[in-house]
Amino acid sequence: MPERTPETHVIDYRAAEQLLAARDPRGAVKLLDGVIAAHPENTAARLLRARAFFAAAQLRPAELEFTIVLEREPDNAYAHFALARTYERQNRPDLARRHFRLAAALDPNPEYLQRARFDT
């Protein structure tokens, strides 16, 4: 196997984006595993892998990745929203509500505001 370089990691990342868009989240995860092994600090790759885990209904790994992203970027509204959706699918409504509200507080995106349910 040829030596992996930063350029091949970028190619793998872009290919993983395409696989996720083509509804092949497991293929995306496989590509991103190598990228993250080489660059564990890469938050964008972790966020993409979290999305792929979520799309593959691998909720615990998705939760872990979204949490890592939020440890590094606590103001990432999308990561809060996606983590909330992950908790929601795990039937953990209190944690879901907390992160829906954090997402809406950070970004007044209409979908975030609707899911935050500030009126209840």
Image (cartoon, helix red, strand yellow):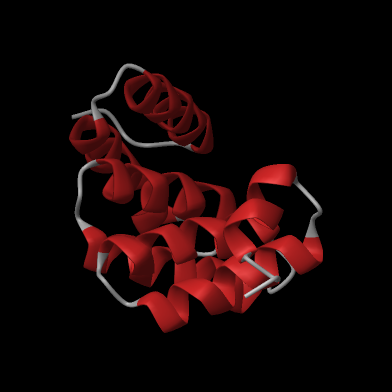
> Looking at the image, which residue is at 27% across and 42% down?
29
Residue 59: quadrant of the picture:
bottom left
Please, is residue 73 above or below residue 6 in the view? below
Query: Foreground residue, 11 or 22?
Result: 22
Nearest the viewer among 97 and 71 is 97
Q: Which of the pair 31/111 is nearer the observer?
A: 111
Q: Is residue 44 visible?
A: yes
**Screen quadrant of the C terminus:** bottom right
Task: Name the spot of residue 12 as percent of width and height, x first.
Answer: 39, 29
- The picture places residue 38, in percent across and down from the top left corner, at 41, 54
Residue at far bottom of view: 94
Q: Quadrant of residue 89?
A: bottom left
Q: Quadrant of residue 58?
A: bottom left
Q: Residue at x 46, y 24 (%)?
A: 11
Q: Is residue 63 above or below residue 2?
A: below
Say which of 4 and 89 sits in front: 89
Residue 66 position (above or below residue 9): below
Name the quadrant of the N terminus: top left
| Residue displayed at 70% across by 71% down | 118
| Residue 87 position in % (x across, y down) | 36, 69
Residue 42 appears in the picture as rendered: no
Q: Is residue 115 left or right of residue 88?
A: right
What x and y, as percent, mark residue 17? 44, 27
